[in-house]
Image (cartoon, helix red, strand yellow):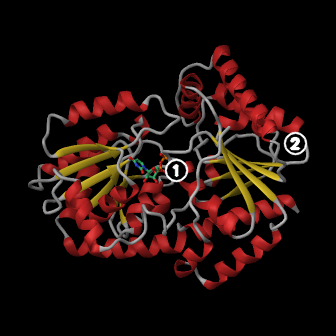
Amino acid sequence: MHAPSLSDQTFDAYTDVTGRDRLERLRSLADTLADSRILHVNSTATGGGVAELLRSIVPVCNDLGIDTDWLVMDADDEFFEVTKAMHNALQGSGPPLTEDMKATYRTVNEQNARELADHGEEYDLAVIHDPQPLGMLDQLEEMMPETVIVWRCHIDLTDPTAEYLAFVSEYTAQVDHGIFSRSDYIGETAVPGTSIIYPSIDPVAEKNRSLEAETIATMCDRLDPLSFEDPLVTQISRFDPWKDQFGTLEAYRRASEDVADLQLALVGGMAGDDPEGLELYEQVAKEAATDPNVHVLTDLSDIGVNVLQRESDVVVQKSLREGFGLVVSEALWKRTPVVGSDVGGIPLQIVDEETGYLVAPDDATGAGERVVDLLENDERRARFGENAREHVQEHFLLPRQLVELLDVLADELE
Ligand code: UDP
């Protein structure tokens, strides 16, 4: 296990974007939890929404006076291949679960649990994020019998492959409480008690904060050969089959029939726990190479992502499955309307015909047509953008999620 380096983010940074009631509630929860030691465990320090979330909430909790640590599992590609298969199978389809895969999963989790014991800290409550670290539970129960265990499940368990669900349920049944991102994601999962908390974005993080015109202009220059004079559609996602970059390409091609000089930016990263990513990236890059207006960009800085979400005319999120899809709120917060699939957390964020458009996940042509609709109508795009900002301000900013999370943790520690 290792502890990622953290920023010195303070709670004060959020006062401008948080209503008074919420601020007071947060301070009161912080008082309640002031004597508790809390641990978050996940499987990667970079890439993906979970790392993104922890990077913000862990320093803020500490600044609020809640003693909070974040530890990331140490694991190799073999483990991540198993957990990626598990992730895919729990969200719908994956390869058969073999005894070897189970053994790899257990061995790496046992090693990490031992490292946690050697770390020598005692915690009142541990939040285990997603299925990867669940295998530590047997040891944790032995090593820290007094510690309350909360499982924060960020994925969609509506339609899991049965053998994988049975495997993880041995662990989930042992936790004290489960937190899911939507009530229907719980499915048949065995968890003693559950809460629903929608994820959120961090409005003061580099990726989402407002930027000076000069910073934007400099970054736009760096993003050459993208032109910000011509229409630009962007999707930002890990290279993962569920994110359907090929569907986005199809939608772009449909939109290009009507919109001259349209460009598509496919921005992606490879999460540290996702060995499949490189292969998919290569396939997408090969296809993109046939069209000079399609740009595949990797390793963008947070400011780069911020500028692209801000300066694109339309953002697309053509996922086939989606736990939540923070990228949608990130774009909406910057007043950029989003055309997204009607799956997972996307319809919570896109109010159809108000903040963007929802399309069926298999309807790339429909997505392309919605993109055209927005690109051809400046007034509508601006109106959707204003609605989008308000919708995210109300529902999907970090202080709201933090209040709900701390509420659950305080309840569990009572
Ligand atoms: N992200 C990024 N660069 C990339 C791709 C993704 O910074 O090239 C970020 C993105 O801005 C978002 C997170 O990674 O904050 C992805 O979270 P989301 O919930 O959309 O999807 P997940 O990867 O968790 O399935």
Q: Which residue is label 2 attached to?
A: 144
Residue type pointed to by label 2: Met
For the C terminus, which image quadrant?
Answer: bottom right
**Alpha carbons under labels 1 and 2: distance apart:** 28 Å
SS assignment at label 2: loop
Confirm if mark 2 falls within 8 A of ligand 1.
no
Task: Say if residue 70 shows up in the picture.
Answer: yes
Left or right of residue 356: residue 159: right
Residue drawn at x 83%, y 33% as measured from the top left: 139
Determine whether the residue tagged by mark 1 lies in a helix, strand or loop: helix
Q: Ligand 1 within 8 A of label 1's CB?
A: yes
Q: Residue at x 35, y 41 (%)?
A: 362
- In the image, 361: left or right of 196? left
Query: Crowding at label 1, few (<14), some or many (≥20) Cα neighbours within 10 Å?
Result: some
What residue is disc 1 on?
49
Residue 329 location (% of width, % of height): 44, 62
Q: Residue lying farthest left?
A: 260
Choose between 167 and 40: the one closer to the eye: 40
Q: Is residue 304 above or below residue 332?
A: above
